[in-house]
Image (cartoon, rainbow, N blue to C red):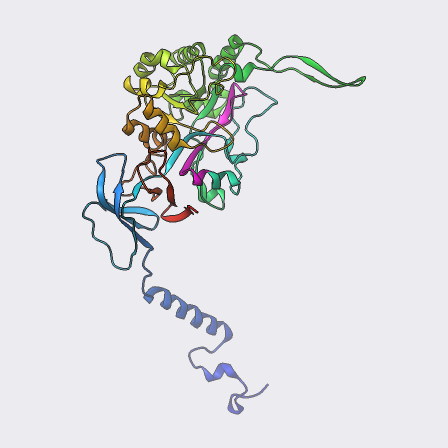
Amino acid sequence: MRSAQDGGNEETQHPNCVLSWGRFLCLLLGLLSLIVFAPKVEAQKLVIRHARILPIRGEIIPDGTIVIESGKIRALGANVQVPSGATVLDVVGATVMPGLVDANAHFGLRDTNEQASEVTPQIRILAQIAPRSPDFTHALAYGVTTACLTPEAANIVGGQCAVVKTSGHTLDQMLLREAAGVRAALGYDTVGGNGGFFRTGGNNLTSIYLRRPNSRMAAVWELRKALDEATKYPALISVRSGKLPLRISAHVENDIRAALTITDEFKIPRLVLDGSVEAYKVADLLAERKVSVVLGPFYDPQIGGPESSEPMLNTPGLLAQKGVVVAFGSNDNDPGPLLHWAALAVKYGLSPEDALRAITLNAAEICGVADRVGSLEVGKDADLLILNGDPLELTTQLEKVLVNGQVVYRAE
């Protein structure tokens, strides 16, 4: 071994670090001192100013400023000071509003119905979400920044809904609420095509298919039975206790009345009706029971299946006039132009204020995420749209979409 005198041992040349593990400790202490005494990095700040701001909850601000920091709204108003070090985006003449909330969507999913059973409350739509689906990019182009993803209506009890942002690379980045309700259904969707029949290929039997229910009466019985046996399913226990809303897809009047009867019988605290094109026929009952209704696309006479023969374009307006909370949802495997539907509803009697709430705050409240999205308020997520005009004018164009304070979509 070479001695210290001939310079062969490097360890003896550093009196503060005698051994190799000592050198490691010195290095670790040095790094810790850098962390403790390093200057703090300023959080990312973005300021949008000279905008016509539609906060949804609160008065319109004709020439306002929004301060965004770390993905949240930190300040907004007519006289807001621009913080130092912020990136400033002047949008003179533009309108800024919250990102849209699709209250009933099926896009971005791989499968939405379980064929082996008609009662599946234990199934979670969360397991079927494909975060990199182009559907989410399509939704952003429509201004939809949040969506409640629900099972479709083939099952009596189809499973648990989830709420996600439409921007993000992973489910963790997108997820707002794991369980936002339990989806159930009555009517044609649950019974159409069911029954026992043979399928043959040549002389060979290929399948025997039998699925319940086969009638509307049986569909009502199946839902009643599932709620009566709620102890088998934690999700239905949450429905009966009011922790989760029961979301029933019921399009025509008799199915809507059946849904009301069942929820009265089991004292279900929270009921949401999806796609109820004939809800106007029982508007007083819905208002009395404080039942929310998600419509859409309400102008499509086929949205409720072949039996929906009496849709009305003024349904949203009639319901809102009675005090029913109304929201819109695409109710499809593709995102929908919610702004256009809101504009159409205004043409047929819905007030502009209620139309904008139907695609923002009302939808967020129904989905249980109004503490995060649905309106422009201090402390909420900075999910917003920048448009070149009034959002309810069909000629208005969407210029930018921000999610968590980041620009995630720009118009060509």
Residue 79: x %, y % from top left? 18, 48
**Residue found at the far bottom of this picture:** 6
Q: Classify residue 391 by image quadrant.
A: top left
The picture places residue 139, in percent across and down from the top left corner, at: 45, 38
The quarter of the picture where the N terminus appears is: bottom right
- The residue sitting at 36% across, 31% down in the picture is 359
Magenta part of the chain: 139-161
Q: Based on the picture, tell me whether residue 157 belongs to the magenta stretch.
A: yes
Residue 56 at x, y = what percent? 28, 34
Q: How many marks?
A: 0
| Residue 292 falls left or right of residue 303 | left
Task: Give me the residue at 26% from left, 34% from top.
Answer: 57
Q: In this view, which residue lies farthest toward the left?
A: 79
**What residue sits 33% from the left and 42% below the top?**
388
Q: Is residue 113 magenta?
A: no
The residue located at (50%, 81%) in the rendering is 11
